[in-house]
Amino acid sequence: MKGISHLLLFGDFNYPDIDYSNQTTSSSDMSHAARFLKKTQDNFLVQNVFEAARYRAHCIPSKLDYIFTSEENLVESLKYDVPIGKSDHVCLSWKFLLEAAQYNEPSSQQLNYWKGDNTSISRELQQVNWASVLDTASVEDSLLSIKTKVYALMDKYIPQKKVRVKKKKSKWMLSETRHQLKIRNQAWKKYEMYRSIENSKQGKPNGAK
């Protein structure tokens, strides 16, 4: 899509018949699930959730929640956390990568890509005899040659800027609250391993139903 560099699409799509690990579905070719799978394939969307995200007593855990991105490696540190309230869906949290990784930068400095001289970088890359550069014995050597040239141009044409160090936030949560959260998390892990009505009630605060 014009003007969009990254795409993030997520939610409860409710298609348990789709298996994104194998890019298949157990439904018929004309079903909503099959048509949805084909649509995501036609748009080259990358699906990032591959573990069960919905747990309900007496039911097989299922994958109903999806996270789609326009490229691979945009979702990092995906976590399947304890459900919120009475929901039977786990709480998904992740990091969405929007900026390029930094290269050999000091801890207090980073490249200021917005002020980089991209015209000069492009001009010098066009002047490189790539046939000669890539005429190496292996793919690894070719990749190293490309990275070395690109990093040299980044250091030459992209200035650095100072990074503001964020102040640490003060602890606002009471120790008793943290203790109750620890009990809740332990109960959830036990429920994931041994699902039962009894285990689903463990770890709740006194008086909770």
Image (cartoon, rainbow, N blue to C red):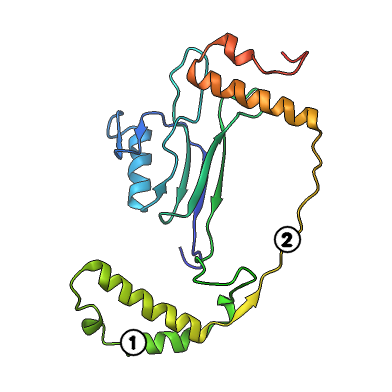
Label disc, if present, on residue 177 of the rendered structure: none
- Quick one: quadrant of the C terminus? top right
Give the mark toward the camera: 2 or 1: 2
Q: Residue at x 45, y 39 (%)?
A: 49
Of labels 2 and 1, earlier in sequence is 1
Along the horizontal axis of the image, is 26 left or right of 183? left
- Quick one: quadrant of the N terminus? bottom left
Vertical side of 160 occupied by 209: above or below = above
CA–CA distance in space, label 2 to label 1: 40 Å
Q: Secondary structure at mark 1?
A: helix
Q: Residue at x 33, y 36 (%)?
A: 34
Label disc, if present, on residue 126 of the rendered structure: 1
Along the horizontal axis of the image, is 4 left or right of 38? right
Q: Given the image, on which type of amino acid does mark 1 rest?
A: Gln
Along the horizontal axis of the image, is 133 left or right of 36? left
Vertical side of 180 occupied by 95: above or below = below
> Does residue 48 appear anywhere in the picture?
yes
Place of residue 146 in the rendered image (x, y in percent of width and height, measured from the top left): 33, 76
Place of residue 2 in the rendered image (x, y in percent of width and height, measured from the top left): 47, 67
Residue of label 2: 166
Place of residue 182 in the rendered image (x, y in percent of width and height, measured from the top left): 67, 27
Q: Residue furthest top?
A: 198
Vertical side of 128 occupied by 145: above or below = above
Q: Given the image, on which type of amino acid does mark 2 rest?
A: Lys
Q: Residue at x 32, y 72 (%)?
A: 144
> Does residue 85 appear anywhere in the picture?
no
Place of residue 187 in the rendered image (x, y in percent of width and height, measured from the top left): 61, 20
Crowding near the residue tagged with mark 2, few <14, some 14–19, many ≥20 C-alpha atoms within 10 Å: few
